[in-house]
Image: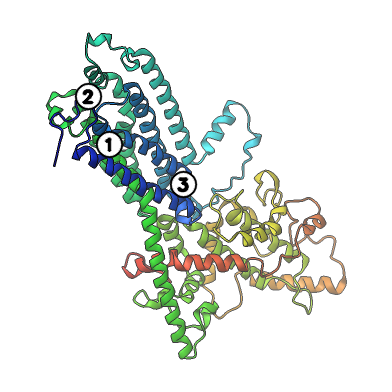
Amino acid sequence: MRLEPLGRNWGDIVNWDDLGKAYAGFIIAWTAILYAGVAWLIKNRDLPFIKIRNVPIAVASVSCLHLYLIKIVLAYTTNGHFLCSLEFWIMSIYLPFGIALFQANLVQLYSISDQQQKLATSAASTSTASIASRSGVRGWWQQWKDLPQIKKSYTYIGIGMFIQVIITAAIYAATPELQGDWRSFGKVPHAKGQALCRKSVAWVPSAFWQLAWSWFFGLWTLWKIRNIHDTHYWRLGTWLSVISGLPGTPLWIAAVFCIQFKPVNIRWVPPMWLAPGIIVMQVVTVFFPIYEAFISRAHMRETLTLIKNWEEKGAQSGEPSVSSGEASNLSVGISTRSKEIFSMASLEQALAVNPLPLLRFAASKDFTAENIIFLMRVREWRQVHASAPRLLNTTTLTADAQELLFRMGVDIYTTCVSDIYSEFPINIDHNIKVALDNVFAPAVPDKKKRLSDDSTSSSPWDIDMEALQKAPIQLEIQRMTLSRETSDESVDTMWSAKSKSLKSQSSRDVKTGFMDDDERPIFARHPATAPLGVARAKIRPAFDGAVFDAAEASIKYLVLTNTWRKFAQEAQGGDEKGMV
């Protein structure tokens, strides 16, 4: 191996020895590989587990870090033929900005985990308070407290980046050496001046962000996520990023200011001690999602094969297909030791009997609680629809029953579907979403006002709409508990008794043609509008018992091939108990 005997000596020629060629070849190859991965991320940015990683911030972080990485990897090859002032700006801006954006991207792990936990226990994603009505300093403070944790983190990081620019500009303006004036060094040759310029204490603040990231913010992040065990390799990536960055800045400072590092510095320049941490951050940001996609697709094919084999087995034995959704007609059970657990029938059985373990898993590990919540709420909506009062001798819903079902549908739409009102909207096909938008969006109250704000009277089947908005999942958990006490074969729901009385009341109204004026209405008017007639006019013709069918089928398939598969595998390993 041919090496320049003096190594990096700030001489008149570049170091095009074998080591210099190796550095150049590495950075060219790594750039090609890295941006091939970036292109893949951008192309597949709509995948659920990539969307939550905030691709624009991830790409910006990788690019800032890579620009600095190119500079330091080629430092030996260029042999100092690079302006000291320009290198100062690159290290003081691109390195801190790259790390700051990486922090902003990585902090989503804790923030999303926290939001998913809240989503599984309350309606924190849609506040009942109107921020627009607040004013003054107290109102601003309240708005700040109401911000999600991730937006607060973005604000802190943005302020830090702004301060970094101000500090860098001030140091540059106050340091003549960085501007090419080396008179303070005495009468020195160009090579010596380049070396002394890079040993100025003015460079120390440029590495402060890396030091703060690794030794302060990074360790704090590890503490905050200590109890998070996600299925997206996010926690592992955070650990690797922080640990790999710990030695960087201390070794860089030692290499710059300690004479003992001189034999090392001529081959491995001081900033190269930051390179391992930078490369790990790039790998975590770009290639972990690609690896997850590869593993997810392999497992999806395996799951679909199991389902196909089970259906073929059922067809040969004369049993109905599990994909038909007739879970109650199948005696497949939910055994953690059987491949039958991966079938659609098992998923539907879990949703019908006890979806809470699956909901907890989705919220704490897979970050897909919105999908389980949507399936739970649609199933509840169908139960209400099945037991709703009809007109005498017909299958047509009474006007009041249709209004209540529409109200519940609007609430499902705002909580789980709408990109405007839902913090975690479900991932469905565009055409399906447009169809739901056309049905429910016109009825959504203005200014994100909750549907229950104008409704004070009781709902017909003891559904407390205000409680439904404030704690929908807690209420659903109570309802699930009540529903489990009934037989699987029973068509009655928890509102059956009240429903029957409503049916007879509706029958009396149809026969007599009028209602007693002294009688209190059994349905509250639609809260989005004042007159009842106008409220009913908002109900689109497309609103019927099948309005959620397409969205439910899409989400159920997504859950079956992703969240349910992971949950079932963990259950088979004995980590999850009480699936039914």
Q: Distance from label 3 to label 1 (Cα)?
A: 26 Å
Q: Nearer the viewer, mark 3 or mark 2?
A: 2
Q: For mark 2, does the 10 Å Cα neighbourhood hold few (<14), some (14 to 19), or many (20 or more) residues?
A: many
Residue 252 at x, y percent in the picture: 23, 30
Closest to the observer: 365 or 309?
309
Q: Which mark is residue 73?
A: 1
Closest to the observer: 185 or 201?
185
Residue position marked by numbered label 2 in the rendering: 10
Residue position marked by numbered label 3 in the rendering: 55
> The disc labelled 2 sits on which kind of residue?
Trp
> The disc labelled 1 sits on which kind of residue?
Val
Residue 194, above or below 496: above
Q: Distance from label 2 to label 1 (Cα)?
A: 16 Å
Left/right of residue 4 with respect to residue 452 in the rendered view: left
Left/right of residue 100 with respect to residue 573 in the rendered view: right
Can you see residue 332? Answer: no
Left/right of residue 195 with respect to residue 278 in the rendered view: left
Closest to the observer: 356 or 466?
356
Q: Quadrant of residue 78?
A: top left
Q: For mark 1, does the 10 Å Cα neighbourhood hold few (<14), some (14 to 19), or many (20 or more) residues?
A: many
Q: Quadrant of residue 413?
A: bottom right
Answer yes or no: do the residues labelled 3 and 2 have beta carbons within 8 Å? no
Residue 111 at x, y percent in the picture: 44, 45
Q: Quadrant of the C terminus?
A: bottom left
Residue appearing at x 16%, y 24% in the figure:
258
Residue 89 at x, y percent in the picture: 37, 25
